[in-house]
Amino acid sequence: MGDGRWGGAERWRSAGGTLGRVIVVWAVSTLTMLILAGLLPDFELQSADGDSFTRTALTAAAAAGAFGLLGALVWPLIVRALLLVPALVLGLLVFFLNGSMLLVALWLIPDGRGAANPETAVVVAAVMSAVASATSTGLAVRDDDAYRRRLYRLTGRTRPRASVEAPEQVPGTVFLQLDGVGHHVLRDAVADGLMPTVAAWLADGHRLTPWRTDWSSQTGASQLGILHGSNEDVPAFRWYEKDTGRLMVSNRPASAVELQRRAVRRTGDGGLLTVDGASRGNLFSGGADQLALVLSMAARRGPRNRSRAGYFAYFSDPANAVRTAGSFVAECVREILQSTRALLRRDTPRVSRGGTYPFVRAFATVLERDVVVSAVMGDMLGGRTAVYADLVAYDEVAHHSGPHGRDTDQVLRRLDRSIALIATVAEHAPRPYRIVLLSDHGQSAGETFEGAYGLTLKELVRAGCGLPVPRRVRRTRSGSEARDAARDALRLALHRPVDETGEAERELPARSSEPLVLASGNLGLVSFPDVPHRMTREEIDRRHPALLRTLAHHPGVGFVLVASAEHGSVVLARGGVEVPVAELDDGGPLAVFGPGAARAVRRTDGFPHVADIMVNSMYDPATGTVHAFEEQIGSHGGLGGEQSHPFLLSPPELSPPVGAGEELVGAEQVHRVLRRWLRECSGPQVPLAISPPPKESESSIPVDRPVAQDKNH
């Protein structure tokens, strides 16, 4: 009886507190509207004959109340109706839609006392949304229950899921992937004060463990291995498969779903996240049931397509929408100013940063970050067991600005703030959470191969084959995950099929007897499409006697891998060096690439779809320089420097990743470590199902032609 009265009193106090906060927010919004009416000549809250201050204040209160109600009731419906609009377009529509709601609110005021032109309405609506959000957050911070309810609302949650049992005793795990942030970069960022949250964790006993990637040091290979336990037969970011005629590209939806299907078939397991998991902003699902912005699911059609579900949860709050849209515009301006400064200062190395790149950068550093972070917050508030999320901001900026410098320092600061926000939300979750930070690869700096030597790898290969080299050759496409994700999101959201053939046809040589040259950072792949098997050195020498010698002796090339009928496979390098792969060790031509290089090359040499010729650029250990075969001054994809050394940062409650004196090598071993940590947190992980089923994965991609699901760069 007493407990019932106490519970009723608590509910009344909670309701009273909520009502009080609503009144305060309403009052602050009214005051904001009065101030804006006094500052902006085109914004009126009075009749043509003038009104008393009291009457004007009542008009402002009515307009603020109407605007708030429209934001709470109508805005979510608008966003849901626009859910299939591309994220970039939705970001540009936010200001217009918010301004339109203000005009409607002014129209609802009796006697026509409220008026504003459309441009002014956009400004007023943006300011009022920001002020109301800040006020509401400030009032809720001191009240844990209110703050928790606000977080639930902002992330699309209303209450924890009922399926969570004994959350106090069973912690959940959040894996945050900082795409492209190498071990050295993280360590330096902490030392320089750029990442205070990470610094505090290290001071509290978190373990910072470097690990070594495979030869293909890029997100496709690393994340596939981390999430699905196998990255077998992924030789690069993009490669040509002779048996199927496919040009596989890790961040194309058709390729991603095929790679995931192969990994699931190889391991017999759905992935790291099959037990109550969520996958956010990744290339692959990891077997998770809850998906948002997952590339391998991006081309799905029908009600099961949840790849853009995270957009609605985030943009359903107008304050979120306005803040992200404003930050999006600010990031575009920031990029234009930074690129202009680099141009005026004649910084070197430098690549082109014009065209759509400012929008692509803003997508990666603002929109994708905000939506993914919000989704992770919602997962924690919902009590989900395992969450894996990828934040691609640093990787995108480092490709064009370089992995070290003022531009990337700013990105690292903002990433640290996102980590701090997620850690704060974890304190309000219905179960404790262990947050693990990791990266999929690092980045190595250096001038592009073309910038250093005046010709592309494709031109060098054609010259070695005795083929004509055109004076003007289209630049090698960049492997930026964010750029292609933004482009494909645009196509898919407009119900236009992803171009699975057109771009590849431009990549493929005009004649099948000519070489196909592909670039993955500082790793180049040369294939001859007209030969159905992997060509041997002897066959290549008979067809193009100067090609291998031209490549191996070029100063921008570190080494070349090619099959040999006599020696199995061999590594060729400058000075006439030839080493059979069977006899390869970390000395000789691979010495500068550090420990593990021989193992990585030997493993890739055994892949069924390894290219006829694998070309790794030079690496200068004194400067850390590599030469990307793409238009990138911060690159990854091959061997050489920081790109091969990502990190794993784990809380002290979890067991050490490896034993004393041991190394963590390869994405597949990282997967096993993360599996072990999930067992430590929640007991044995029994996969509920293999998700997605292989047949469904294949059929979910619209393909107009039977040959090559993925024929674009």
Image (spheres, rainbow, N blue to C red):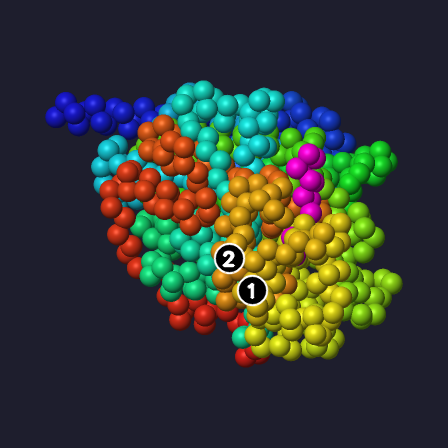
Q: How many marks?
A: 2
**179 within the magenta span:** no
For the C terminus, the image quarter is bottom right
Picture quadrant where residue 683 is located: top left
Which residue shows up at 70% across the image and 55% down it? 576
Asked whether, in this view, residue 14 is left or right of residue 121, the answer is: left
Query: Residue 38 at x, y = what percent?
Result: 71, 26
Question: Local crowd at mark 1 within 10 Å, few (<14), some, or many (≥20)?
Answer: few
Picture quadrant where residue 382 is located: top left
Task: Kindly report the distance in space between the C-alpha atoms of the residues bearing marks 2 and 1.
Answer: 8 Å
Query: Residue 165 at x, y = what percent?
Result: 23, 41
Secondary-structure class at tag 1 = loop
Q: Are marks 2 and 1 in contact (CB under 8 Å)?
A: yes
> In the figure, 185 relative to 204: above or below?
below
Give the amino acid type for the residue marked by disc 2 in the picture.
Ala
Residue under label 2, please give it.
Answer: 582
